[in-house]
Amino acid sequence: MAMSLADVADSRKLDITSALSSFGVHNGTDFDGKAVLNLTYECAAASCRDTGMGECSIGQFDPGYFESETIQWIKVYEALESLCDGLESDINIDIAGPGVLITYITQTAMVVFAWLFFLLLKVNKFINTSTSIFTHLFRKRNPGPNLLTHRVSGLERLERTNLAYATSTFLAELHEAQCFFVVAIEIALINASSRSAIFTGADNWQSLLWNRDSVQFLAGMGAWPIILGQISLRRAELDSMYYLILSTLALALAGVAADTAANPDPDRIYKMFQGQNTLEECGGHPSLRTFCVEERESIYWYVFPAGSIYAFLGLLAILWWAKLWSMCNSPASFVKRHKSLSKRQLEAWEWFKWFVIKASLLGTHIAEAGALACICFGLAVIRAPLLNLLLRGETGTWSVGQLVAVLIWAPVISKYAHLAILGVEKGFRLRLSKAFEIVKRSDTRPGSDSEAISLN
């Protein structure tokens, strides 16, 4: 049944009455709308006179804006339309300053280097296997020296060099350090989201939005290398439950930080500005320019959806599945638990195992490709704001925190260089207690755990 015009009018009247009641006006006839608009104009004029967020000027109220108890809203709009002109806002340097951005780029570069290194060694094993199959098929014991054989021997030598041993140690320590780095950053960003606007360095709504875009973007920049690092650990046979737990914690916090930034509570944001930019003409409340958003475009030309990080948590679950499978289905434990199975049941188990391994391998490659694509895209996105900050030439952009952030990876890089130059044995001998001895094994080839899922 269609609602009549009278019903609509009554409904709107009730809404207006309810709104006035919330402001302590219980009788609509006692509400002086003209006085309220005049006070609003005085607040807007005072907001423009306060040049703390830039300069602006508003027009004068036309005397005829309120005639015969009717408000000429077009005249009110024309007078106040320039209130947000000339708004000055900026991001919080502590959230996305040049030092912080360089730190994320350095983290990404180190992880990609380690990933490429162990991928190269994996290519070596693949070429060796392919060459062996080719030789067997054509009944040639020695195919003869050629360019392919030379490359294979070179990769084999690389796998046995001190650089490879040092890079393995570097990868493990880098992944541990980046997980704690991301955890610390995300806890700080989540805390900042619940504090007042002045805590995050936001002077107005636009600055707050830019800060939140930075939080959302950098949450992804810190999370994607963790996926790539965890896969590299698996490929280097260095993964453990400890690293998986660290990776899961870091990604979960990154997802929470990004989601909080993407879906802020408007009431809480309004309260964040209470007590900031207050003006007497506005009744002791914030300046109207505090809530201006002159340009909604982010400083980043693209911000990844917050849910993308939760997607990587799902991909990390594949690595959890592979690790738990390897632990629970080792050859010894399998034979002990399933020695009573029939031949048909064993064949069915082999088919199931093959399917699980292939599905896990496919999922891991998807995670690897997705993380690498996001990293490349993120580096392209971060380039513009970083250049903008570096070209400013202002000493204020390089605070103490920014200088500390730039050097945060120095210990990891320094130790890697130390082990690569002196050798792993000598390097660790200088670091460990005299009660321990570092001995190089003669055979470091992977074991024969046939039930482990290879995600290489």
Image: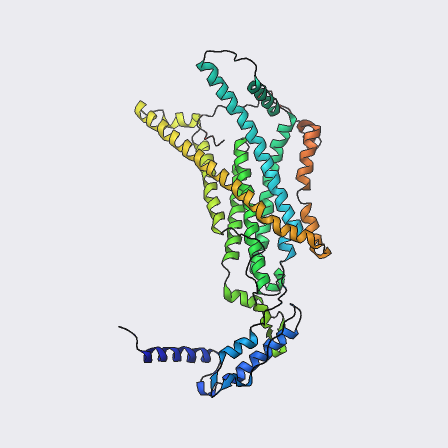
When asked about the image quadrant of residue 111, the answer is top right
* Residue closest to the eye, 244 or 359: 359
When asked about the image quadrant of residue 232, the answer is top right
**Residue at the limit of the structure toward the right, as seen here:** 395
Q: Residue at x 52, y 83 (%)?
A: 65
Report the number of discs: 0
**Residue 99, x across and y down, in percent:** 67, 49
> Is residue 96 toward the left or the right of residue 240 in the image?
right
The reply to whether residue 411 is visible in this rendering is yes
> Is residue 37 toward the left or the right of residue 400 in the image?
left
**Residue 118, x across and y down, in percent:** 56, 31
Q: Residue at x 63, y 42 (%)?
A: 106
**Residue 324, x across and y down, in percent:** 45, 35
Quadrant location, the N terminus = bottom left
The reply to whether residue 401 is visible in this rendering is no
What colouring does the structure picture have? rainbow
Q: Residue at x 62, y 28 (%)?
A: 164
* Residue closest to the eye, 296 or 428: 296
When asked about the image quadrant of residue 289, the answer is bottom right
* Residue closest to the eye, 144 or 238: 144
**Residue 426, x across and y down, in percent:** 70, 28
